[in-house]
Image (spheres, rainbow, N blue to C red):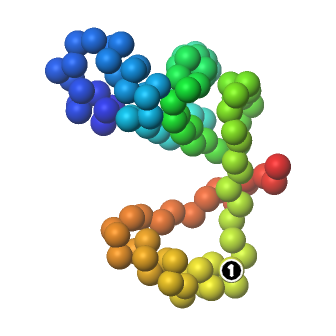
Amino acid sequence: MAIARLIRDVQDIGFVRSMVHAGALSVIVDGLNEVSADTREKISGFAKDMSRGDVFIGTQPIEWTPPPSALVVDLLPLERVEAERFLLSAQFAQIASKGYTVTRTSPRSKRL
């Protein structure tokens, strides 16, 4: 939805596709598990078509087959001690100073 607002005046979808393929535009889809199977299939087809570009898809665990060229990364929750160590680290201070939001991953994430 956000990208639609930004490019609403762009009439040529080929332009947007070329930007993705060139790496000038990254596509981020979050909440794949929150849409219908039909919509998941469309997103999968889009990701497959855009395989030369950067397409990031976020989801909680679901029955879904990612595109063949996809790199799958499962985020695991930190143990409490690890979380405290991270929050007190210089790395977190740098992230926080840039205004990024840090969110917790699902406790249902699985290891690869």
Q: Looking at the image, which residue is at 35% across and 76% down? A: 97
Is residue 43 visible in the rendered structure shown here? no
| Residue 38 place in picture, x, y as percent | 58, 16
- The quarter of the image holding the N terminus is top left
Q: Residue furthest left?
A: 9
Residue at 34% across, 22% down: 16
Counting from the top left corner in percent of width and height, residue 55 is at 52, 34
- In this view, 58 is above or below 68: below
Choose top left, top right, bottom left or bottom right for residue 100: bottom left
Q: Is residue 12 left or right of residue 60?
A: left
- Direction from residue 94 to residue 70 in the image, left or right: right
Instruction: Write the residue at 23% across / 33% down.
Output: 6
Secondary structure beneath dot 1 equals helix
Number of numbered discs on residues: 1
37 over 34 or under it: above or below: above
Task: Classify residue 85 as left or right of residue 19.
Answer: right
Q: Residue at x 68, y 56 (%)?
A: 75
In this view, the residue in front, 2 or 106, is 2
Query: Which x, y percent locates residue 109?
Result: 73, 53
Crowding at dot 1, Cα within 10 Å, few <14 / some 14-19 / many 20+, comes out as few
The amino acid marked with disc number 1 is Glu
Name of the residue lying farthest toward the right: 112
Mark 1, residue position: 82
Q: Quadrant of residue 63?
A: top right
Q: Nearer the viewer, residue 96 or 35?
A: 96
Q: Position of residue 57 (x, y in %)?
A: 56, 38
Residue 75 visible in the picture: yes
Q: Residue furthest front?
A: 22
